[in-house]
Image: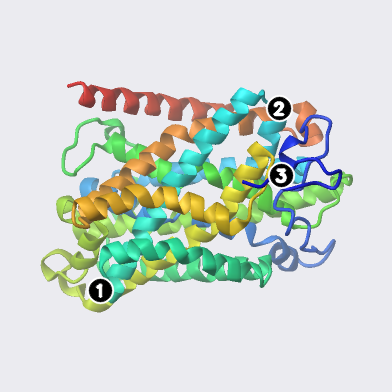
Amino acid sequence: MMVQQTADNQPHGALLMQGGTQNKSLEQVNGTIAVPKSGSFWRRLLAFSGPGALIAVGYMDPGNWVTSVQGGASYHYLLMSVVMLSAAIGMLLQYLAGKLGIVTQEDLAQATAKRTKKATRYFLWFITELALIATDIAEVVGGAIALNLLFGWPLLLTVIMTAFDVILLLGLMKFGFRKIEAIVMTLILTILFVCLYLVFLSKPDLAGVFGGLMPQKEVLSTQAIHGLSSPLFLTAGIIGATVTPHNLYLHSSIVQTRKVDKKNPAEVKEAIKWMAWDSNGQLTLAFIVNALLLIVGAALFYGHANELASFKGMYLALQNQQMAGAIASPFLSTLFAVALLASGQNSTITGTLAGEIIMEGFLHFKIPMWLRRVITRGVALIPVIAIAVLYGGNEHDLDALITGTQVFLSVVLPFSMAPLLYFTSSKKIMGQFVNKKSVTVIGWLCFIALTVINIWLVLEQMGQWFG
């Protein structure tokens, strides 16, 4: 593999991060979007809006669909509090990631590589790459099944077709970053509209919905009562599907597309403020989508979790009057498939960008975007094609694969959280923009709680393996 050459004729991968020169994150779009220094609230918010939409995509990808709908179908509104908690953790972490990028002009991968030993750097890169592949698996399965449901094409064919979605992204990049942000936002609004329409027709129990927002001890139960998985297992899956590691790297990079004078503290402070508005606003939309998915699962399919063990099961259930009641229709199931396809394509765009950021930041070299995408998608296709061939394209097995990847993302999330919390809590790195003590304490408490859940999951899985 050829390594990119720098101006001083040294290999890009050989550049020293400490005390040396460092390429800008996503250099082709870094600092390319001018922002007004004054003007109305909405004018300035619009100028900074966009990165939040790309981040929100990862909070409503196909992995979220499986865990949220399954959570509602299995345990009614019990896990609503988990969806809300996941969104709150996501808002905190994305804010910290965005702040790190604006203040240091480094993405999280660059900041980590610059301040860790070589062995640690390569270990964290490997873990993060696995997380990216796990995310990609959910995109492959979601997109492939959506095409299969909409057009009736064989599942194996649609799985292979997802390998060519890189052409879509390469075409979009030629139109500029703001166009990508606009397209992603359009797809997000499509998903939101479909979910709102489904919930409106399902007439959920509003008392149950708001009651579910209050945390209950049953959330931590390890016993599978109604559904296919225990509440705690689905809790880890929902957190893993919501707060994905690659989003932290992505956000710390794409906030740098806005032209901000790092040497001017007032400009930096303003940029952080508008980044927070953009990020929290978009993640609120993502929370609404995930909550709506869980509500649909609870209102329409509670007690039928076994029949909803696959995307196809959800698709067919929306046509089944015994399950969906009077609102059942082919039109609803088609809307579901369209929203699923939009979700998969959105995640493809952001996953490819995150892959470039992670490889350049940790390993200090760059390869063409199309090659990077082919490698990541090629690895993700292996288990999906294997299931499609060995099990005849059984959607239940494919969706079980998605659930497993979301739990894996929850397990590896602390490896990205710890450096982010450490860097943004360091006065030496962040200067006057260092985290408040309360933010640091809350962040590390989330880290500890998630780590404890993950340790339990690993021990539980080992217990099953060894009887």
Foreground mark, 1 or 2, reads 1
Q: CA distance from mark 3 to mark 1?
A: 44 Å
Residue 285, x across and y down, in percent: 50, 59
Residue at image location 65% in from the left, 38% down from the top: 363
Dot 2 or dot 3, earlier in sequence: 3
Residue that mark 3 sits on = 101
Labels 2, 3: front one:
2
Query: Does 111 sit left or right of 338 as displayed?
Result: right
Mark drawn on residue 404: none
* Marks 2/3: CA–CA distance: 15 Å
Of tags 3 and 1, the one toward the viewer is 1
Q: Which three-letter amino acid code belongs to the residue tagged 2?
A: Arg
In the rendered image, which residue does mark 1 sit on? 152
Disc 2 target residue: 115
Q: Within 10 Å of the Cα at label 2, are there few (<14), some (14-19), or many (20+) other Cα atoms?
A: some
Q: Is residue 161 visible?
A: yes
In the rendered structure, the answer to whether residue 75 lies left or right of residue 126 reads left
Amino acid type, mark 3: Gly
> Counting residues from the N terminus, which is met first, the one under dot 1 or under dot 2?
2
Residue 350, quarter of picture: bottom right
